[in-house]
Amino acid sequence: MELPSQVLQGVGQEEHGSGLIDAKAPVFLPSVTALGTFLFLTPAAVWRWEVGTSLASGTVLSLQRKSSKAKEKKQKRLEERAAMDAVCAKVDAANRLGDPLEAFPVFKKYDRNGLNVSIECKRVSGLEPATVDWAFDLTKTNMQTMYEQSEWGWKDREKREEMTDDRAWYLIAWENSSVPVAFSHFRFDVECGDEVLYCYEVQLESKVRRKGLGKFLIQILQLMANSTQMKKVMLTVFKHNHGAYQFFREALQFEIDDSSPSMSGCCGEDCSYEILSRRTKFGDSQHSHTGGHCGGCCH
């Protein structure tokens, strides 16, 4: 291999140790060229050739390290994408069910504490318009004041759109099989990279409260979350809704979720709500972000 001509050029005198050497004095360096002859290099040219070779080797190593890091990042992205695909596949499978309550026939009846109600599970698209109107009106009656005391405020149009979203599922409790007395609006969704059952509402008519029906509906949600391999049941509760907050934290053993403002440092004490959760048997001991953001990502 023939060295570039500029490497072979000697310049002046160069320092060497404590004295000077003649930079023009040739040094015999056996190097086979394409013609099979030998090259003669000056000491200065030899020094520059060695330095150049060292720099070139360093550049190669640097490029190799960068290439290795790029491959590691790509592999990590592929693993995160595969994990998120698996999460979304579970959510999609849950949403394809005809009736998530079908596997639990014993929970289709609540007959205690003076109540005798039947419970069904349907998509919002499967409900009669009159039932949807009843659910909205009950939510407004029970919650409008709570919303108005928060930073969210109450807006009829936004709440109705939320309650009639295509992803919405409903548990409806019927008295005498014809009069609705309680409901839960929930969804199978992805929150912060986890597959979850998110409870949007649990609303009861005043005449059926404090008789265990609300707790029974939440237990059904937990059963369905387990059967569909969701990692947890989640919900949002106002801090100033003291009865509901105590009910979920103490009676149902929900914990403040990692994504709640008071835990994540988002707005802390300035927020009027907490996000609570209870893990299923499929939930990890530690919250794991698999690349998703807080919010649904499979749609």
Image (cartoon, rainbow, N blue to C red):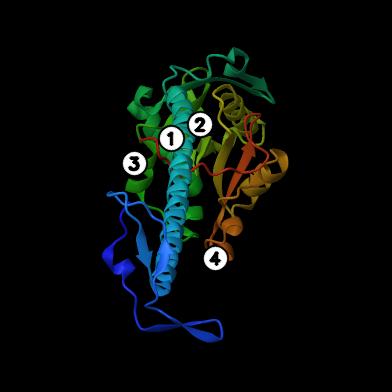
Return the disc, 1 or 2, that comes first in the chain's sequence. 1
Disc 3 packing (10 Å; few <14; some 14–19; many ≥20): few
- Provide the residue designation for mark 2: 183
- Work out whether residue 294 can be spotted: no
Q: Secondary structure at mark 3?
A: helix
- Work out whether residue 37 can be spotted: yes
* Vertical relation: 153 (above or below) 45: above
Q: Comparing marks 3 and 2, which lies closer to the viewer?
A: 3
Mark 3 → mark 1, Cα distance in angstroms: 13 Å
- Provide the residue designation for mark 4: 270
Q: Which percent across, then down, holds residue 227?
A: 58, 21
Task: Tell me if 57 is positioned left or right of 267 in this view.
Answer: left
174, 3: nearer the viewer: 3
Q: Which percent across, then down, holds residue 297?
A: 40, 39
* Vertical relation: 254 (above or below) 180: below
Q: Which percent across, then down, holds residue 136?
A: 41, 39
Residue type beneath disc 2: Phe
Mark 4 → mark 2, Cα distance in angstroms: 30 Å
Residue type beneath disc 3: Glu
Q: Comparing marks 1 and 4, which lies closer to the viewer?
A: 4
Return the disc, 3 or 4, that comes first in the chain's sequence. 3
Mark 1 → mark 4, Cα distance in angstroms: 30 Å
- Provide the residue designation for mark 3: 161
Mark 3 → mark 4, Cα distance in angstroms: 27 Å
Determine which of the numbered discs, if any, sits on residue 135 in the image. Answer: 1
Please report contact status of discs 1 and 2: CB closer than 8 Å, yes or no.
yes
